[in-house]
Image (cartoon, helix red, strand yellow):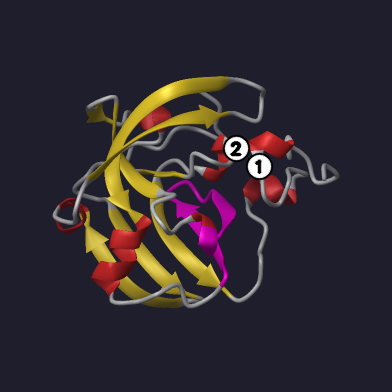
Amino acid sequence: MLSAGPTPRVRTEDWSFTLKHGPRPIKKWNWTEFNALPLTRMTRDIHCVTAWTKFDTAWQGVLVDDILADAGIEPPTAFTLAHSFDGYSTNVPAKDLVAGKAMVALLYEGKPITPDHGGPARLLVPHLYFWKSAKWLNGVQFTERDEPGFWELRGYHIYGDPWREQRYSGDP
């Protein structure tokens, strides 16, 4: 497992997820409240920027669509930053988080996600390279412009489409 730094150990009692528009919080959920949202199963291939793919991975979690519905909003901007407990962030266009394309995953292969794999909750955006599926997720922030996150600031592609091999900032 690759990570940008040490693995945080986030207890579910301490976990929360905040949806923001810019600096303004829209809604915040604790672990119990978040787990009361509709859960969806998703089986997808995942793709790492280091050139491996894992086929048919099974996930269960809350679709971003259901998070937005619970907050009573549509995406207010075209851009987002996903934020993690360790300070990591990654940009994902809002259109790539909706229409059943992405979830906040709570289970992997039927079991709680381990800390090494980003648990207790991680973003899952399986149609993009896996660095876009932020580990140890604690929120999504809608932004007015496309703001690069941790790896994007260090030369990774701003979008990260595995089918177009968009690994680095100079890739088409």
The answer to which quarter of the image holds residue 59 is top left
Q: Residue at x 66, y 24 (%)?
A: 50
Does residue 74 sit above or below 8 in this rendering? below
Q: Which mark is residue 161?
A: 1
Residue 93, given in percent of the width and then of the height, sits at: 58, 60
Q: Which mark is residue 129?
A: 2
Q: Within 10 angstroms of label 2, few (less than 14), some, or many (20 or more) residues?
A: many
Q: Is residue 50 left or right of residue 26?
A: right
Residue 2, given in percent of the width and then of the height, sits at: 56, 27
Q: Nearer the viewer, residue 101 or 153?
A: 101
Q: Within 10 angstroms of label 1, few (less than 14), some, or many (20 or more) residues?
A: some
Q: Residue at x 49, y 42 (%)?
A: 133
Q: Residue at x 44, y 61 (%)?
A: 140
Going by the numbered disc 2, the residue's amino acid type is: Tyr
> Is 75 one of the magenta-colored residues?
no
Answer with mark 1 or mark 2, whichever residue precedes in sequence: 2
Labels 1 and 2 touching (C-beta < 8 A): yes
Q: Residue at x 80, y 46 (%)?
A: 169
Magenta span: helix, strand or loop, mainly?
strand
Q: Quadrant of the C terminus?
A: top right
> Is 89 one of the magenta-colored residues?
yes
State which region is magenta. 78-95
Q: Is residue 155 left or right of residue 76?
A: right
Going by the numbered disc 1, the residue's amino acid type is: Asp
Q: Is residue 8 left or right of residue 34?
A: right
Q: CA distance from mark 1 to mark 2?
A: 6 Å
**Element on which disc 1 rests:** loop
